[in-house]
Image (cartoon, helix red, strand yellow):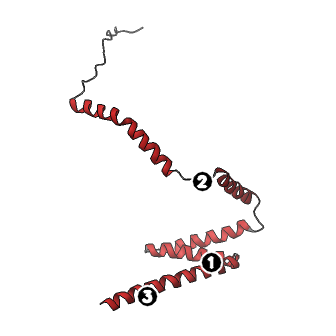
Amino acid sequence: LSLYSSPARETKYVENPQTQLEEGVSRLRHVMEPYTTWCQAELIDASKVKVDSSLCSDFFSEGYEFLQNPPAGFYPRLGVIGFAGIVGLFLARGSRIKKLVYPTGLMGIGASMYYPQQAVAIAKVAGTQLYDWSLQGYIAVESLWKDN
């Protein structure tokens, strides 16, 4: 039992009247709604990544199966390569460039110990790419030098 009587509830919600600006914006939105929905649908269709679901599901299922039944010694190799990256982070105190170069370099060295054939193939491709870039840079500098 309450000691005090509760006051009668006489609250009533009253919405503020819209200003002319709000009414104008509301009318504009209603008029433009079909066009905006059409544009949104076109943009969504254009921006969707066109990926075949069977290809995507095959990729993830193959990865899952690989991790469930890895080749012999896969996890210890992965541990050594990951530990090399952590050591690289520990050694890379100071500049941001060191924090990028040391871990990736040490992980690359660790991976090349376990996968030498793939490392040779990657080194060949990287070497030709580096040679092409340096040649393009040399040509650009030479053309600038001759122009002056």
Q: Position of residue 108 (x, y in %)?
A: 60, 76
- The residue under label 1 is which amino acid type? Ile
Which is closer to the viewer, label 1 or label 2? 2
Of pointers 1 and 2, the one earlier in the residue sequence: 2
Of pointers 3 and 1, the one earlier in the residue sequence: 1
Q: Position of residue 87 (x, y in %)?
A: 57, 73
Q: Which residue is mark 3?
A: 138
Image quadrant where residue 76 sits: bottom right
Q: Position of residue 43 (x, y in %)?
A: 45, 48
Of pointers 3 and 2, the one earlier in the residue sequence: 2
Task: Calculate the distance from the C-alpha at mark 3 to the C-alpha at mark 2.
Answer: 40 Å
Q: Which residue is mark 1?
A: 122
In this rendering, the answer to whether 60 lies above or below 106 is above
- Quadrant including the C terminus: bottom left
The residue shown at (34%, 91%) is 146
Q: Position of residue 47 (x, y in %)?
A: 49, 51
Q: Which residue is mark 2?
A: 51
- Asked which secondary structure carries label 3, the reply is helix
Task: Calculate the distance from the C-alpha at mark 3 to the C-alpha at mark 1.
Answer: 24 Å
- Quadrant including the N terminus: top left
Task: Calculate the distance from the C-alpha at mark 1 to the C-alpha at mark 2.
Answer: 27 Å
82 with respect to 32 (left or right): right
The residue shown at (24%, 24%) is 17
- Asked which secondary structure carries label 1, the reply is helix
Residue 102 marker: none
Residues at circles 1 and 2 in contact by the CB criterion of under 8 Å = no
